[in-house]
């Protein structure tokens, strides 16, 4: 029997506090359907991670902090 497919969402971030609340609110409609959420933050200094931690409630939320680089963040999130 084949394993049940899983769905993971990768969110790369860097200093996007002004936009992240609206993004997280739009995710609320479907976030219960995903198995895991991986946030890869490029060491934001504007409170992005604080907003994510306070607004995104998911049992399998993983937050990875790394140096800047959008494509490297995507790759790290996918590898995780």
Image (cartoon, rainbow, N blue to C red):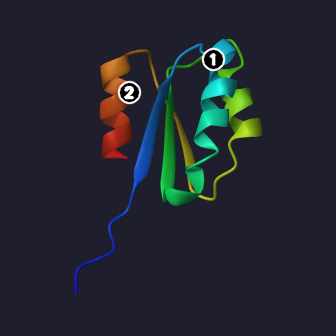
Q: Answer left or right for 38 relative to 80.
A: right
Q: Determine which quarter of the picture holds residue 18.
A: top right
Q: Position of residue 21 (x, y in %)?
A: 69, 26
Q: Residue at x 31, y 44 (%)?
A: 79
Q: Which mark is residue 19?
A: 1
67 w.r.t. 77: above or below: above
Q: Quadrant of the N terminus?
A: bottom left
Residue toward you, 79 or 19: 19
Mark found first going from the N terminus, 2 or 1: 1
Residue toward you, 47 or 58: 58
Q: Which class describes the residues within 10 Å of circle 2: few (<14), some (14-19), or many (20+)?
A: many
Q: Residue at x 69, y 12 (%)?
A: 46
Q: Which mark is residue 61?
A: none
Q: Answer left or right for 63 relative to 69.
A: right
Q: Answer left or right for 2 relative to 27.
A: left
Q: Determine the CA span between mark 2 and mark 1.
A: 18 Å
4 w.r.t. 18: above or below: below
Q: Residue at x 28, y 77 (%)?
A: 3
As helix, strand or loop, the secondary structure at mark 2 comes to helix
Callout in the foreground (2, 1): 1
Q: Residue furthest bottom?
A: 1
Q: Residue at x 58, y 40 (%)?
A: 27
Q: Residue furthest left?
A: 1
Q: Position of residue 9 (x, y in %)?
A: 44, 44
Q: Which class describes the residues within 10 Å of circle 1: few (<14), some (14-19), or many (20+)?
A: few
As helix, strand or loop, the secondary structure at mark 1 comes to helix
**Which residue, given by chain and number where applicable, does mark 2 sit on?**
73
Q: Position of residue 56 (x, y in %)?
A: 68, 42
């Amino acid at each position: 029997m084949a394993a049940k497919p899983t769905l993971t969402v990768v969110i790369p971030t860097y200093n996007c506090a002004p936009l992240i609340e609206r993004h997280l609110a739009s995710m609320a409609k479907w976030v219960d359907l995903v198995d895991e959420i991986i946030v890869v933050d490029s060491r934001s200094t504007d409170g992005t991670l604080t907003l994510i931690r306070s607004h995104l409630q998911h049992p399998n939320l993983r937050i990875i902090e790394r140096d800047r680089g959008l494509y490297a963040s995507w790759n790290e999130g996918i590898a995780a």
